[in-house]
Image: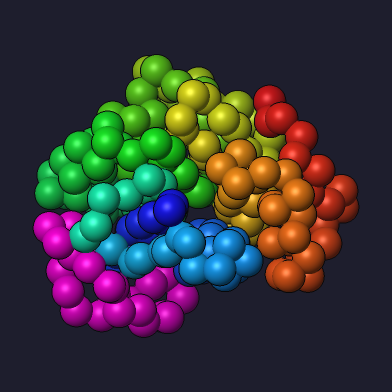
Amino acid sequence: MTTYGLLVFEDAEELDFVGPWEVFTVSARLREGADRAVLLAEHPGPVRCNKGLRVLPDHTLDDHPPLDVLHVPGGRGAREVQVHNPVVTGWIGETARRAAWVHGVCTGTFLLHAAGPARGRRVATHRSHEDTLQARGDVTVVRDARYVVDGGLVTSQGVSAGIDSALWLVGRLHGRDHARAVRRCLQYDPAPPYLADEPL
């Protein structure tokens, strides 16, 4: 069983977690419920995201099941607010040590850098924030790559690139044919389509 935990917070970019959520939950359905995805937040109430979507987390940071995959979205809330929240950064750092995979999308990489998992690693982030992240030091920003894998850390460029990296991840976890089946269910047909190519 694979448990995906997707962190949400005020002003998170919606598609940064909704896109991977779709990939992870379709993957779970194709595996006949063998896996599950849960939304996590610091507090139990509704969370208003960057474009106004409100979501209700399944668990708080204190009461969630063990996670195999920790997902961190980006958005203004990631790069400007949560990077200064020691509760969230501390939780990310501790949870990342126990998870098999850490998955960051867009400026979620800023939050992973602040929390520790991205330090000293090769990462991707939204193209408009690459210089800012590189200037923070102790990180190598790979440009012009939809997603980058460095050990158990997978990071991607902004918004829709999170779908690509999530497909790569379910392919790594459950096989390339499975990832292709997920892509077909999503009718996700980028050019080129998912080919399970190794990232840069």
Horizontal side of residue 69 vs 86, given as left or right:
right
Q: Quadrant of residue 64?
A: bottom left
Which region is colored magenta? 41-63
Between 31 and 128, the residue placed more toward the observer is 31
Query: In the image as oriented, which residue stretches furthest toward the right?
Result: 191
Q: Quadrant of residue 116?
A: top left
Q: Residue at x 39, y 36 (%)?
A: 100
Residue 22 visible in the snapshot: no
Horizontal side of residue 184 vs 170, given as left or right:
right
Horizontal side of residue 89 vs 87, given as left or right:
right
Image location (x, y in percent) of residue 130:
53, 35
**Mostly what secondary structure, the magenta segment?**
loop
In the rendered structure, does residue 51 fall within the stretch colored magenta?
yes
Between 91 and 182, the residue placed more toward the observer is 182
Image location (x, y in percent) of residue 23:
59, 62
In the rendered structure, does residue 44 fall within the stretch colored magenta?
yes
Q: Residue at x 17, y 74 (%)?
A: 44
Q: Residue at x 69, y 52 (%)?
A: 179
Q: Is residue 73 above or below residue 139?
A: below
- In which quadrant of the rendered image does the C terminus lie? top right
Horizontal side of residue 11 vs 163, given as left or right:
left
Image location (x, y in percent) of residue 59:
22, 68
Q: Is residue 38 above or below residue 158?
A: below
